[in-house]
Image (cartoon, helix red, strand yellow):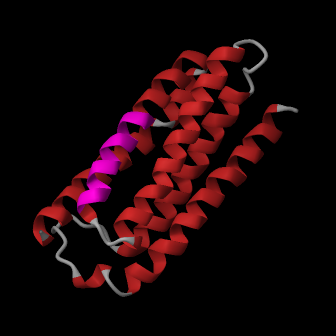
Amino acid sequence: MNKIAKIAIALVVCLMVGYSASMVTRPSVETWYPTIIKPVFNPPNWIFMPVWTLLYVFMAVAAGLVWDKIKEQNAEVKKALGFFVVQLILNALWSYLFFGLKNPMLALIEIAILWLMIYETYLKFLKINKTAGYLLIPYMAWVSFAAILNASIWWLNR
């Protein structure tokens, strides 16, 4: 399988994860989320979909680039992609905790673990393919912002 096919498969997986998370997010954004207190730096709701779509594309390209090195660095690639899958699952889980269960405190604990898994994935990707690692930097930055936003929402609504 060539590099483009690997990136395409990773893209489908990432976008499916994003779509599944949006299914639990959407109803709460229309009902529960408008009723809670949010900090002044809370972005408008419309910004989240394009940002997350772009981040999922970056993640997919990164994963595809790493996957493409499987013949040369089999063990390292498998470990790196294992971390990638774990962080992707945690990524989706956050939406279920925050929007599905409407539990900002539990989501805050989970997002800290998610950030650590993203960082470890970044380090592993960087060793295999520098571009793949760099593609995860915007994701880490956004999740850092999301963690601050999550913490603020928890604090304001406790």
The residue at 45%/73% (across/down) is: 25
Quadrant of the rendered image containing residue 156:
bottom left
The answer to whether residue 145 shows anywhere in this view is: no
Q: How many circles with numbers are drawn on the protein?
A: 0
Q: Is residue 156 left or right of residue 63?
A: left
The residue at 53%/46% (across/down) is: 88
Quadrant of the rendered image containing residue 77:
top right
| Dominant secondary-structure state across the stretch colored magenta | helix
Q: Is residue 53 left or right of residue 144?
A: right
The residue at 52%/36% (across/down) is: 135
Q: Is residue 52 left or right of residue 74?
A: left
Instruction: Give the magenta-colored segment's residue range.
Output: 105-118
Position above or below: 136 against 126: below
In magenta segment, residue 84: no
The residue at 12%/68% (across/down) is: 158
Give the quarter of the figure containing the N terminus.
top right
Judged from this view, the residue extending furthest toward the top is 72
Residue 118 % position (x, y): 44, 36
Position above or below: 38 against 92: below
Judged from this view, the residue extending furthest toward the right is 1
Quadrant of the rendered image containing residue 81:
top right
Residue 97 % position (x, y): 38, 63
Residue 36 % position (x, y): 21, 79
Residue 82 or 33: which is nearer the viewer?
A: 82
Residue 62 % position (x, y): 61, 35
The answer to whether residue 157 shows anywhere in this view is: yes
In magenta segment, residue 114: yes
Q: Is residue 87 left or right of residue 151?
A: right
Position above or below: 78 against 56: above
Residue 97 or 74: which is nearer the viewer?
A: 97
Position above or below: 55 against 40: above
